[in-house]
Image (cartoon, rainbow, N blue to C red):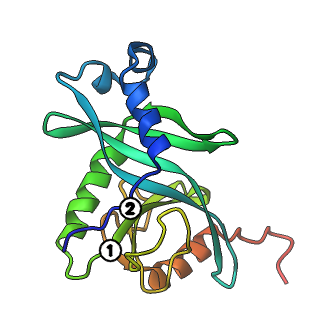
Amino acid sequence: MPLHVPPAPAPALRSVLTALGSPTAVREARTPSLRTAQGPATPELPLPVHVLDEITAAGASATRLTGWRFLIRCQDRAVAAAETRLTPDGWAFSHFFEGPYIASTERALRQAETMQQPYQPRLLSVPGLYMLTLWLHGDLTADGAGGHPAATDLLVPLAPAPPGIAAHRPHRVAELLPVLTHRATPAPLLGQLA
């Protein structure tokens, strides 16, 4: 089934296009593959980036939108990503970057396109575990900028995933959230045991 990629805010896309058109922004980016890419660089697959700020003992979570991420494609492959952020003046370009999450995101998106059910793709970051997932949201009409993971949504951990969590294996939120809750809960200090 095709993925239903939510449209990025027009100012976010414009800010990325402006940065790509700026020799200074590209030259100063710490992305060697973007600086040496042959041919035009185009932003594709805008994904809203949500952060899972807190995982409580009850498993409840709070998420917030932190930006939009665009894969930057040159010829037939993604060579980098560009991230935008919301400022008091609206959407602004934040930075270019590269690394393992670029290829991992592409792989997870290809994997999601083979699933029987259509989804709206998003990214969900779990900073407390140094983890990034492809969040496959089941409500195709939802605003990509809002919402919380539903129990039936899928999370696909991107590589590199934390130890003990398999990368590129889709998990229902209801299945993975308890694991994340356990991992994110600090262990009691020795002397504070009941």
Residue 103 in the image: above or below residue 194: above
Label 2 environment density (alpha carbons within 10 Å; few <14, some 14–19, many ≥20)? some
Q: Position of residue 168 (x, y in %)?
A: 30, 65
Outermost left residue: 76
**184 or 32: nearer the eye?**
32
Residue position for label 2: 6
The amino acid type found where label 1 is placed reads Tyr
What residue did someone put label 1 on? Answer: 119
- Point out residue 192 in the picture as x, y percentages from the top left corner: 86, 73
Q: Is residue 97 above or below residue 130?
A: above
Q: Secondary structure at mark 1?
A: loop
Residue 100 percent coordinates (x, y) = 34, 44
**Location of residue 175 with respect to 119 vertically, above or below:** below
Residue found 47% across the figure and 78% down from its top? 176
Mark nearest the camera among 1 and 2 is 2
Amino acid at pointer 2 = Pro
Residue under the image location 20 percent in, 61 percent down:
110
Q: CA distance from mark 1 to mark 2?
A: 10 Å
